[in-house]
Image: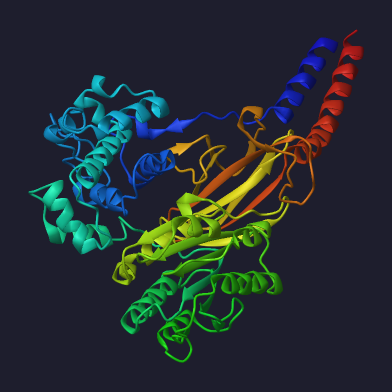
Amino acid sequence: MMEAAQSVLMLLLFVVHSPTNFAQQDATMDNRAAGKSVVDAVIKCLDRASIFPDDRNILRRIACAETQYGQNAITFTESNWGGIWQVTAADFERTQNTGRYPHLVHLHDNIKTLWNIQWNSLDRRDLLKPFYSGLVARLVLTLTEIAENKPIPVLISAQAGYWQAYYNPLGSLPAFQTAATSNACESQCLGRLDICIMMDSSGSIGFLNFFLARVFLKDLLGSFEGGSARAALVVFSSTVHLTFPLDTNMTWSEKRLAALDTKLTPHLRDNTHTAAAIKYCIDMFNSTPSIPGVPKINLVITDDTVANTAPLAAAVGITSFAVGVGSEVVLSELLQITDNNRDRVHYLDNFQDLAEFFRQLNRETCEIPQTPRINDTISDSLIRAERRYFRYPVREEGIHIRISTTAGKIAAYYSYTETNPSDAVNDGKIDGITVIPYHKARTTSASRLDSAGSSSDLPLVEVYITVVGMSENNNYTIQGTTYMTNAVSVANYLCKIVLFIYGCLLLVGSVLT
Protein backbone atom coordinates (compact mmCIF):
# COMPACT_ATOMS: atom_id res chain seq x y z
CA MET A 1 0.00 0.00 0.00
CA MET A 2 2.87 2.32 0.79
CA GLU A 3 4.37 1.64 -2.65
CA ALA A 4 1.07 2.47 -4.36
CA ALA A 5 0.84 5.80 -2.57
CA GLN A 6 4.42 6.65 -3.52
CA SER A 7 3.67 5.81 -7.17
CA VAL A 8 0.67 8.15 -7.17
CA LEU A 9 2.81 10.91 -5.65
CA MET A 10 5.56 10.53 -8.26
CA LEU A 11 3.02 10.51 -11.10
CA LEU A 12 1.36 13.71 -9.94
CA LEU A 13 4.67 15.49 -9.48
CA PHE A 14 5.69 14.44 -12.99
CA VAL A 15 2.48 15.89 -14.41
CA VAL A 16 3.05 19.15 -12.55
CA HIS A 17 6.64 19.67 -13.66
CA SER A 18 6.66 18.04 -17.10
CA PRO A 19 6.92 20.77 -19.78
CA THR A 20 4.91 20.75 -22.98
CA ASN A 21 6.79 18.96 -25.74
CA PHE A 22 7.45 20.83 -28.95
CA ALA A 23 7.64 19.41 -32.44
CA GLN A 24 8.92 21.51 -35.30
CA GLN A 25 6.46 22.06 -38.13
CA ASP A 26 7.78 23.17 -41.53
CA ALA A 27 5.13 22.85 -44.22
CA THR A 28 7.38 24.53 -46.80
CA MET A 29 8.98 21.10 -47.34
CA ASP A 30 5.71 19.16 -47.51
CA ASN A 31 4.49 17.99 -50.91
CA ARG A 32 1.48 20.00 -52.11
CA ALA A 33 1.34 22.24 -49.03
CA ALA A 34 -0.46 25.49 -49.82
CA GLY A 35 -1.75 28.71 -48.31
CA LYS A 36 -0.66 32.25 -47.57
CA SER A 37 1.30 31.30 -44.47
CA VAL A 38 3.27 28.72 -46.49
CA VAL A 39 4.16 31.32 -49.13
CA ASP A 40 5.08 33.84 -46.43
CA ALA A 41 7.40 31.30 -44.80
CA VAL A 42 9.14 30.50 -48.09
CA ILE A 43 9.71 34.17 -48.88
CA LYS A 44 11.01 34.94 -45.38
CA CYS A 45 13.49 32.09 -45.65
CA LEU A 46 14.74 33.32 -49.03
CA ASP A 47 14.98 36.92 -47.82
CA ARG A 48 16.97 35.92 -44.74
CA ALA A 49 19.54 34.20 -46.93
CA SER A 50 20.50 37.58 -48.47
CA ILE A 51 21.74 35.97 -51.69
CA PHE A 52 19.12 37.55 -53.95
CA PRO A 53 18.44 41.22 -54.76
CA ASP A 54 15.22 42.86 -53.56
CA ASP A 55 12.38 41.29 -55.52
CA ARG A 56 10.07 44.31 -55.00
CA ASN A 57 7.40 41.96 -53.61
CA ILE A 58 6.83 40.35 -57.02
CA LEU A 59 7.49 36.78 -55.80
CA ARG A 60 4.53 37.00 -53.43
CA ARG A 61 2.34 38.49 -56.14
CA ILE A 62 3.28 35.80 -58.67
CA ALA A 63 2.28 33.08 -56.19
CA CYS A 64 -1.06 34.78 -55.72
CA ALA A 65 -1.66 35.41 -59.43
CA GLU A 66 -0.55 31.95 -60.58
CA THR A 67 -2.32 29.69 -58.07
CA GLN A 68 -3.87 31.78 -55.26
CA TYR A 69 -1.01 30.61 -53.01
CA GLY A 70 -1.47 27.02 -54.18
CA GLN A 71 -5.18 26.91 -53.31
CA ASN A 72 -6.33 26.96 -56.93
CA ALA A 73 -7.63 23.56 -58.03
CA ILE A 74 -5.20 23.37 -60.96
CA THR A 75 -2.07 23.82 -58.82
CA PHE A 76 -1.25 20.18 -58.26
CA THR A 77 -3.11 18.42 -61.06
CA GLU A 78 -1.63 15.35 -62.76
CA SER A 79 1.77 16.01 -64.41
CA ASN A 80 1.68 19.66 -63.25
CA TRP A 81 4.91 19.82 -61.28
CA GLY A 82 5.48 23.57 -61.26
CA GLY A 83 4.20 23.94 -57.70
CA ILE A 84 2.75 27.08 -56.17
CA TRP A 85 4.78 29.31 -58.49
CA GLN A 86 3.92 27.19 -61.57
CA VAL A 87 7.52 27.05 -62.78
CA THR A 88 7.69 25.71 -66.35
CA ALA A 89 10.01 22.91 -67.44
CA ALA A 90 11.93 25.40 -69.62
CA ASP A 91 12.49 27.80 -66.74
CA PHE A 92 13.54 24.96 -64.44
CA GLU A 93 16.15 23.93 -67.00
CA ARG A 94 17.37 27.53 -67.24
CA THR A 95 18.26 27.48 -63.56
CA GLN A 96 20.57 24.51 -64.20
CA ASN A 97 22.29 25.98 -67.27
CA THR A 98 25.54 27.34 -65.83
CA GLY A 99 27.07 27.49 -69.30
CA ARG A 100 24.61 30.12 -70.50
CA TYR A 101 24.27 31.78 -67.10
CA PRO A 102 27.64 31.88 -65.27
CA HIS A 103 25.94 33.83 -62.44
CA LEU A 104 24.35 30.55 -61.42
CA VAL A 105 27.61 28.98 -60.27
CA HIS A 106 27.89 31.33 -57.28
CA LEU A 107 24.17 31.03 -56.51
CA HIS A 108 24.32 27.23 -56.62
CA ASP A 109 27.27 27.30 -54.23
CA ASN A 110 25.35 29.54 -51.82
CA ILE A 111 22.31 27.28 -52.02
CA LYS A 112 24.45 24.25 -51.26
CA THR A 113 26.01 26.02 -48.26
CA LEU A 114 22.74 27.37 -46.87
CA TRP A 115 20.34 24.48 -47.47
CA ASN A 116 22.52 21.54 -48.50
CA ILE A 117 20.81 21.37 -51.90
CA GLN A 118 22.82 19.97 -54.82
CA TRP A 119 21.09 21.93 -57.54
CA ASN A 120 21.74 19.78 -60.59
CA SER A 121 20.47 16.70 -58.74
CA LEU A 122 17.00 18.21 -58.37
CA ASP A 123 14.05 16.75 -60.24
CA ARG A 124 11.14 18.91 -61.35
CA ARG A 125 8.85 16.84 -59.14
CA ASP A 126 10.67 18.39 -56.18
CA LEU A 127 8.82 21.61 -57.00
CA LEU A 128 5.71 20.11 -55.43
CA LYS A 129 7.42 21.20 -52.21
CA PRO A 130 6.68 24.94 -51.77
CA PHE A 131 10.24 25.86 -50.80
CA TYR A 132 11.72 24.37 -53.98
CA SER A 133 9.05 25.97 -56.18
CA GLY A 134 9.71 29.38 -54.61
CA LEU A 135 13.47 28.97 -54.80
CA VAL A 136 13.37 28.07 -58.51
CA ALA A 137 11.01 30.97 -59.22
CA ARG A 138 13.39 33.32 -57.40
CA LEU A 139 16.32 32.03 -59.48
CA VAL A 140 14.32 32.59 -62.68
CA LEU A 141 13.62 36.20 -61.66
CA THR A 142 17.28 36.73 -60.76
CA LEU A 143 18.41 35.45 -64.17
CA THR A 144 16.00 37.84 -65.87
CA GLU A 145 16.99 40.74 -63.66
CA ILE A 146 20.77 40.36 -63.58
CA ALA A 147 21.90 38.12 -66.42
CA GLU A 148 19.49 39.63 -68.93
CA ASN A 149 19.56 43.14 -67.40
CA LYS A 150 15.79 43.43 -66.91
CA PRO A 151 15.29 45.03 -63.47
CA ILE A 152 12.07 44.29 -61.59
CA PRO A 153 9.76 47.33 -61.45
CA VAL A 154 7.94 48.44 -58.28
CA LEU A 155 4.42 49.40 -59.37
CA ILE A 156 1.91 46.57 -59.68
CA SER A 157 0.85 47.57 -63.20
CA ALA A 158 4.48 47.44 -64.35
CA GLN A 159 5.05 44.16 -62.53
CA ALA A 160 2.08 42.68 -64.38
CA GLY A 161 3.78 43.50 -67.68
CA TYR A 162 7.09 42.11 -66.39
CA TRP A 163 5.40 38.87 -65.30
CA GLN A 164 3.73 38.45 -68.68
CA ALA A 165 6.88 39.29 -70.65
CA TYR A 166 9.41 37.20 -68.71
CA TYR A 167 7.55 34.67 -66.59
CA ASN A 168 4.13 33.71 -67.98
CA PRO A 169 3.50 34.88 -71.58
CA LEU A 170 -0.05 33.51 -71.45
CA GLY A 171 -0.87 35.38 -68.25
CA SER A 172 -3.60 38.03 -68.03
CA LEU A 173 -2.46 41.54 -67.03
CA PRO A 174 -5.80 42.46 -65.36
CA ALA A 175 -5.81 39.13 -63.48
CA PHE A 176 -2.34 39.80 -62.08
CA GLN A 177 -3.26 43.31 -60.96
CA THR A 178 -6.51 42.15 -59.38
CA ALA A 179 -4.76 39.35 -57.51
CA ALA A 180 -1.90 41.60 -56.34
CA THR A 181 -4.26 44.16 -54.77
CA SER A 182 -6.77 41.69 -53.30
CA ASN A 183 -7.08 41.09 -49.57
CA ALA A 184 -6.21 37.45 -50.19
CA CYS A 185 -2.79 38.47 -51.52
CA GLU A 186 -1.94 41.57 -49.50
CA SER A 187 -4.02 41.47 -46.34
CA GLN A 188 -4.20 44.65 -44.29
CA CYS A 189 -2.87 44.80 -40.74
CA LEU A 190 -4.60 47.35 -38.51
CA GLY A 191 -1.70 47.07 -36.09
CA ARG A 192 -0.95 47.50 -32.42
CA LEU A 193 2.08 49.78 -32.48
CA ASP A 194 3.36 53.33 -32.06
CA ILE A 195 4.94 54.79 -35.19
CA CYS A 196 6.58 58.14 -35.86
CA ILE A 197 6.68 58.87 -39.60
CA MET A 198 9.33 61.33 -40.80
CA MET A 199 8.97 62.72 -44.34
CA ASP A 200 11.85 64.59 -45.96
CA SER A 201 10.58 68.03 -46.99
CA SER A 202 13.82 69.52 -48.30
CA GLY A 203 14.38 71.63 -51.39
CA SER A 204 15.77 68.74 -53.41
CA ILE A 205 12.24 67.29 -53.57
CA GLY A 206 10.26 69.05 -56.27
CA PHE A 207 6.67 70.24 -55.98
CA LEU A 208 5.19 67.25 -57.82
CA ASN A 209 7.30 64.75 -55.90
CA PHE A 210 6.26 66.20 -52.56
CA PHE A 211 2.62 65.99 -53.65
CA LEU A 212 3.19 62.28 -54.39
CA ALA A 213 4.80 61.93 -50.95
CA ARG A 214 1.71 63.46 -49.30
CA VAL A 215 -0.55 60.98 -51.11
CA PHE A 216 1.68 58.14 -49.92
CA LEU A 217 1.48 59.39 -46.33
CA LYS A 218 -2.30 59.56 -46.59
CA ASP A 219 -2.49 55.96 -47.82
CA LEU A 220 -0.01 54.67 -45.23
CA LEU A 221 -1.97 56.26 -42.40
CA GLY A 222 -5.21 54.87 -43.84
CA SER A 223 -3.78 51.32 -43.76
CA PHE A 224 -3.82 51.43 -39.93
CA GLU A 225 -7.35 52.86 -39.64
CA GLY A 226 -9.68 50.93 -37.37
CA GLY A 227 -6.97 49.36 -35.24
CA SER A 228 -5.20 50.32 -32.04
CA ALA A 229 -2.07 51.77 -33.65
CA ARG A 230 -0.95 55.29 -32.80
CA ALA A 231 0.88 57.44 -35.36
CA ALA A 232 2.75 60.74 -35.38
CA LEU A 233 3.73 62.62 -38.53
CA VAL A 234 6.57 65.10 -38.93
CA VAL A 235 8.16 66.70 -41.97
CA PHE A 236 11.75 67.89 -41.85
CA SER A 237 14.29 69.97 -43.67
CA SER A 238 16.67 72.25 -41.78
CA THR A 239 13.92 72.38 -39.16
CA VAL A 240 11.30 69.90 -38.00
CA HIS A 241 7.56 70.53 -38.37
CA LEU A 242 5.00 68.50 -36.42
CA THR A 243 1.79 67.68 -38.30
CA PHE A 244 0.31 65.70 -35.38
CA PRO A 245 1.76 63.89 -32.32
CA LEU A 246 1.38 60.31 -31.10
CA ASP A 247 -1.23 61.16 -28.48
CA THR A 248 -3.43 63.27 -30.77
CA ASN A 249 -7.22 63.08 -30.50
CA MET A 250 -7.56 63.35 -34.28
CA THR A 251 -9.50 60.59 -36.07
CA TRP A 252 -7.75 58.55 -38.74
CA SER A 253 -9.81 60.37 -41.36
CA GLU A 254 -8.55 63.69 -39.98
CA LYS A 255 -4.98 62.37 -40.00
CA ARG A 256 -5.25 61.41 -43.66
CA LEU A 257 -6.58 64.85 -44.55
CA ALA A 258 -3.81 66.50 -42.52
CA ALA A 259 -1.19 64.62 -44.56
CA LEU A 260 -2.63 66.20 -47.74
CA ASP A 261 -2.98 69.69 -46.25
CA THR A 262 -0.24 72.03 -47.52
CA LYS A 263 -0.33 74.06 -44.28
CA LEU A 264 -0.36 71.16 -41.85
CA THR A 265 2.20 69.18 -43.88
CA PRO A 266 4.23 71.95 -45.53
CA HIS A 267 6.99 71.68 -48.12
CA LEU A 268 9.82 73.36 -46.17
CA ARG A 269 12.26 73.46 -49.14
CA ASP A 270 15.53 73.82 -47.22
CA ASN A 271 18.50 71.55 -46.50
CA THR A 272 18.10 67.96 -45.25
CA HIS A 273 18.66 67.46 -41.52
CA THR A 274 17.55 63.90 -40.82
CA ALA A 275 19.29 63.75 -37.45
CA ALA A 276 17.07 66.50 -36.08
CA ALA A 277 13.93 64.65 -37.17
CA ILE A 278 15.05 61.37 -35.60
CA LYS A 279 15.92 63.13 -32.33
CA TYR A 280 12.53 64.84 -32.42
CA CYS A 281 10.74 61.47 -32.65
CA ILE A 282 12.91 59.94 -29.93
CA ASP A 283 12.02 62.84 -27.63
CA MET A 284 8.34 62.37 -28.49
CA PHE A 285 8.47 58.68 -27.59
CA ASN A 286 10.20 59.51 -24.31
CA SER A 287 7.68 62.20 -23.36
CA THR A 288 4.49 60.41 -24.44
CA PRO A 289 2.97 57.84 -22.04
CA SER A 290 3.59 54.48 -23.68
CA ILE A 291 1.56 51.28 -23.74
CA PRO A 292 3.70 48.54 -22.11
CA GLY A 293 5.11 46.12 -24.66
CA VAL A 294 3.80 47.92 -27.74
CA PRO A 295 6.55 48.36 -30.40
CA LYS A 296 7.98 51.83 -30.97
CA ILE A 297 8.84 52.40 -34.62
CA ASN A 298 10.62 55.18 -36.49
CA LEU A 299 10.05 55.44 -40.25
CA VAL A 300 12.25 57.79 -42.29
CA ILE A 301 11.57 58.62 -45.95
CA THR A 302 14.32 60.71 -47.55
CA ASP A 303 15.96 61.50 -50.89
CA ASP A 304 19.28 62.69 -49.47
CA THR A 305 22.14 61.79 -47.13
CA VAL A 306 21.61 61.32 -43.42
CA ALA A 307 23.56 61.70 -40.19
CA ASN A 308 24.70 58.87 -37.94
CA THR A 309 21.82 58.76 -35.45
CA ALA A 310 20.84 55.08 -35.42
CA PRO A 311 22.41 54.22 -32.05
CA LEU A 312 20.22 56.85 -30.38
CA ALA A 313 17.00 55.19 -31.51
CA ALA A 314 18.12 51.59 -30.98
CA ALA A 315 19.44 52.37 -27.50
CA VAL A 316 15.97 53.34 -26.27
CA GLY A 317 14.18 50.36 -27.81
CA ILE A 318 12.95 51.97 -31.03
CA THR A 319 12.89 49.89 -34.22
CA SER A 320 13.78 51.95 -37.30
CA PHE A 321 12.89 51.64 -40.98
CA ALA A 322 14.45 53.73 -43.75
CA VAL A 323 13.15 54.34 -47.27
CA GLY A 324 15.54 56.03 -49.70
CA VAL A 325 14.15 57.59 -52.87
CA GLY A 326 16.23 58.60 -55.88
CA SER A 327 19.86 58.49 -56.95
CA GLU A 328 21.33 60.67 -54.18
CA VAL A 329 20.65 58.17 -51.41
CA VAL A 330 23.62 56.28 -49.94
CA LEU A 331 22.89 52.76 -48.73
CA SER A 332 25.45 52.86 -45.90
CA GLU A 333 23.77 55.95 -44.48
CA LEU A 334 20.32 54.38 -44.62
CA LEU A 335 21.77 51.42 -42.74
CA GLN A 336 22.87 53.81 -40.00
CA ILE A 337 19.21 54.63 -39.42
CA THR A 338 18.20 50.96 -39.09
CA ASP A 339 21.13 49.96 -36.87
CA ASN A 340 22.60 47.99 -39.80
CA ASN A 341 19.47 45.90 -40.31
CA ARG A 342 19.34 45.41 -44.09
CA ASP A 343 15.82 43.98 -43.99
CA ARG A 344 14.47 47.34 -42.82
CA VAL A 345 16.10 49.40 -45.57
CA HIS A 346 14.26 50.00 -48.84
CA TYR A 347 15.33 51.83 -51.95
CA LEU A 348 12.98 53.26 -54.59
CA ASP A 349 13.99 54.77 -57.91
CA ASN A 350 11.57 57.69 -57.78
CA PHE A 351 8.61 59.17 -55.90
CA GLN A 352 6.12 57.57 -58.30
CA ASP A 353 7.15 54.21 -56.81
CA LEU A 354 5.80 55.32 -53.42
CA ALA A 355 2.25 55.02 -54.75
CA GLU A 356 1.75 51.38 -53.70
CA PHE A 357 4.61 50.97 -51.27
CA PHE A 358 2.41 51.70 -48.25
CA ARG A 359 1.09 48.11 -48.38
CA GLN A 360 4.54 46.63 -47.83
CA LEU A 361 5.40 49.06 -45.04
CA ASN A 362 2.10 48.30 -43.33
CA ARG A 363 2.90 44.58 -43.35
CA GLU A 364 6.53 44.95 -42.24
CA THR A 365 5.86 47.36 -39.38
CA CYS A 366 3.00 45.18 -38.14
CA GLU A 367 5.37 42.19 -38.00
CA ILE A 368 7.48 43.79 -35.27
CA PRO A 369 6.52 41.77 -32.16
CA GLN A 370 5.14 43.23 -28.96
CA THR A 371 7.21 42.57 -25.83
CA PRO A 372 4.78 42.38 -22.89
CA ARG A 373 6.12 42.23 -19.36
CA ILE A 374 5.89 38.94 -17.53
CA ASN A 375 2.53 38.66 -15.67
CA ASP A 376 0.92 41.47 -17.72
CA THR A 377 -2.41 40.59 -19.33
CA ILE A 378 -2.85 42.02 -22.84
CA SER A 379 -6.39 42.48 -24.20
CA ASP A 380 -6.72 42.81 -27.95
CA SER A 381 -9.05 42.46 -30.96
CA LEU A 382 -8.44 40.98 -34.41
CA ILE A 383 -10.42 40.80 -37.62
CA ARG A 384 -10.40 37.63 -39.73
CA ALA A 385 -6.87 36.59 -40.86
CA GLU A 386 -5.28 39.49 -39.00
CA ARG A 387 -2.20 38.54 -36.98
CA ARG A 388 -0.57 39.84 -33.85
CA TYR A 389 3.00 39.05 -32.83
CA PHE A 390 4.63 38.76 -29.40
CA ARG A 391 8.07 38.04 -27.97
CA TYR A 392 8.71 36.72 -24.46
CA PRO A 393 11.90 35.78 -22.60
CA VAL A 394 12.12 32.15 -21.49
CA ARG A 395 14.08 31.51 -18.32
CA GLU A 396 15.39 28.12 -17.25
CA GLU A 397 12.11 27.19 -15.57
CA GLY A 398 10.17 27.82 -18.81
CA ILE A 399 7.22 30.14 -19.46
CA HIS A 400 3.50 29.63 -19.04
CA ILE A 401 1.37 31.21 -21.85
CA ARG A 402 -2.34 31.63 -21.22
CA ILE A 403 -4.61 32.74 -24.11
CA SER A 404 -8.33 33.21 -23.51
CA THR A 405 -10.92 34.06 -26.17
CA THR A 406 -13.90 36.21 -25.17
CA ALA A 407 -15.40 36.52 -28.66
CA GLY A 408 -14.81 34.75 -31.97
CA LYS A 409 -12.02 32.23 -32.45
CA ILE A 410 -8.23 32.50 -32.59
CA ALA A 411 -5.29 30.22 -33.40
CA ALA A 412 -1.84 30.70 -31.84
CA TYR A 413 1.62 29.31 -32.58
CA TYR A 414 5.07 29.67 -31.05
CA SER A 415 8.66 29.32 -32.23
CA TYR A 416 12.12 29.80 -30.79
CA THR A 417 13.62 30.84 -34.13
CA GLU A 418 10.86 32.18 -36.41
CA THR A 419 10.00 35.75 -35.42
CA ASN A 420 6.56 35.38 -37.05
CA PRO A 421 5.51 31.73 -36.58
CA SER A 422 2.42 30.40 -38.33
CA ASP A 423 0.53 27.21 -39.02
CA ALA A 424 3.17 26.55 -41.71
CA VAL A 425 6.32 27.02 -39.62
CA ASN A 426 6.30 26.69 -35.83
CA ASP A 427 7.65 24.78 -32.85
CA GLY A 428 4.22 24.20 -31.35
CA LYS A 429 0.62 25.33 -31.08
CA ILE A 430 -0.79 27.24 -28.11
CA ASP A 431 -4.18 26.05 -26.93
CA GLY A 432 -5.55 27.67 -23.77
CA ILE A 433 -2.72 27.27 -21.26
CA THR A 434 0.59 26.07 -22.68
CA VAL A 435 3.94 25.56 -21.00
CA ILE A 436 6.87 26.44 -23.27
CA PRO A 437 10.14 24.93 -22.04
CA TYR A 438 13.61 26.45 -21.95
CA HIS A 439 16.07 25.09 -24.54
CA LYS A 440 19.74 25.97 -24.25
CA ALA A 441 20.32 25.10 -27.89
CA ARG A 442 18.11 28.03 -28.83
CA THR A 443 19.76 30.75 -26.75
CA THR A 444 20.14 34.14 -28.41
CA SER A 445 22.56 36.02 -26.17
CA ALA A 446 23.91 36.07 -22.64
CA SER A 447 23.17 38.29 -19.65
CA ARG A 448 20.39 40.46 -21.05
CA LEU A 449 17.38 42.15 -19.51
CA ASP A 450 14.14 40.24 -19.72
CA SER A 451 10.72 41.80 -20.32
CA ALA A 452 10.23 42.39 -16.62
CA GLY A 453 13.48 44.35 -16.52
CA SER A 454 15.39 41.93 -14.30
CA SER A 455 18.94 40.98 -15.18
CA SER A 456 20.15 37.42 -15.54
CA ASP A 457 23.49 35.77 -16.21
CA LEU A 458 21.77 32.80 -17.83
CA PRO A 459 21.77 32.62 -21.61
CA LEU A 460 18.54 34.17 -22.86
CA VAL A 461 16.05 32.14 -24.83
CA GLU A 462 13.28 34.07 -26.57
CA VAL A 463 10.02 32.64 -27.82
CA TYR A 464 7.95 34.26 -30.55
CA ILE A 465 4.17 33.94 -30.62
CA THR A 466 1.62 34.65 -33.35
CA VAL A 467 -2.10 35.02 -32.67
CA VAL A 468 -4.41 34.79 -35.71
CA GLY A 469 -8.04 35.88 -35.96
CA MET A 470 -10.17 33.04 -37.33
CA SER A 471 -13.64 34.65 -37.21
CA GLU A 472 -14.90 38.01 -38.48
CA ASN A 473 -14.31 39.65 -35.09
CA ASN A 474 -12.17 38.17 -32.35
CA ASN A 475 -11.41 39.35 -28.80
CA TYR A 476 -8.75 37.65 -26.71
CA THR A 477 -6.29 38.08 -23.84
CA ILE A 478 -2.73 36.80 -23.59
CA GLN A 479 -0.55 36.50 -20.50
CA GLY A 480 2.94 35.11 -19.94
CA THR A 481 4.03 33.95 -16.49
CA THR A 482 7.04 31.99 -15.29
CA TYR A 483 6.34 28.29 -15.40
CA MET A 484 7.79 27.66 -11.96
CA THR A 485 5.42 30.12 -10.31
CA ASN A 486 2.41 28.33 -11.80
CA ALA A 487 3.88 24.89 -11.21
CA VAL A 488 4.52 25.58 -7.55
CA SER A 489 0.96 26.84 -7.06
CA VAL A 490 -0.50 23.77 -8.74
CA ALA A 491 1.94 21.50 -6.89
CA ASN A 492 0.92 22.90 -3.53
CA TYR A 493 -2.71 22.24 -4.32
CA LEU A 494 -2.04 18.74 -5.62
CA CYS A 495 0.19 17.91 -2.67
CA LYS A 496 -2.75 18.52 -0.34
CA ILE A 497 -4.79 16.07 -2.42
CA VAL A 498 -1.93 13.56 -2.40
CA LEU A 499 -1.58 13.82 1.38
CA PHE A 500 -5.30 13.31 1.79
CA ILE A 501 -5.21 10.22 -0.48
CA TYR A 502 -2.09 8.96 1.30
CA GLY A 503 -3.82 9.32 4.68
CA CYS A 504 -6.87 7.46 3.39
CA LEU A 505 -4.71 4.63 2.08
CA LEU A 506 -2.93 4.32 5.41
CA LEU A 507 -6.26 4.29 7.24
CA VAL A 508 -7.67 1.59 4.95
CA GLY A 509 -4.47 -0.41 5.31
CA SER A 510 -4.60 -0.27 9.11
CA VAL A 511 -8.24 -1.38 9.10
CA LEU A 512 -7.54 -4.33 6.80
CA THR A 513 -4.63 -5.49 8.90
Looking at this view, is 453 or 408 the one in front?
453
Q: On the rendered structure, is 90 left or right of 22?
A: left
Which image quarter: residue 316? Answer: bottom right
In the picture, the quarter occupied by the N terminus is: top right
Where residue 293 appears, as percent x and y from the top left, is 65, 58
Q: On the rendered structure, is 460 left or right of 261?
A: right
Residue lying at 33% horizontally and 78% vertically, measured from the top left: 209
Residue lying at 50% horizontally and 69% vertically, measured from the top left: 227
In the picture, the quarter occupied by the C terminus is: top right
Where residue 354 appears, as percent x and y from the top left, is 34, 68
Where residue 176 appears, as percent x and y from the top left, is 18, 57
Looking at this view, is 501 or 513 the one in front?
501
Q: Is residue 84 visible?
A: no
**401 relative to 209, above or below:** above
**43 relative to 506, above or below:** below
Please count the marks in the image. 0
Looking at this view, is 219 or 472 the one in front?
219
Q: On the rendered structure, is 400 left or right of 337?
A: right
Q: Residue furthest top?
A: 513
Q: Residue furthest bottom?
A: 263
Q: Is residue 398 visible?
A: yes
Colour mapping used in the image: rainbow
Which image quarter: residue 21? Answer: top right
Q: Residue furthest left?
A: 170
Which image quarter: residue 185? Answer: bottom left
Where residue 53 appears, as percent x and y from the top left, is 34, 46
Looking at this view, is 313 or 237 the one in front?
237
Residue lying at 34% horizontally and 50% vertically, measured from the top left: 54
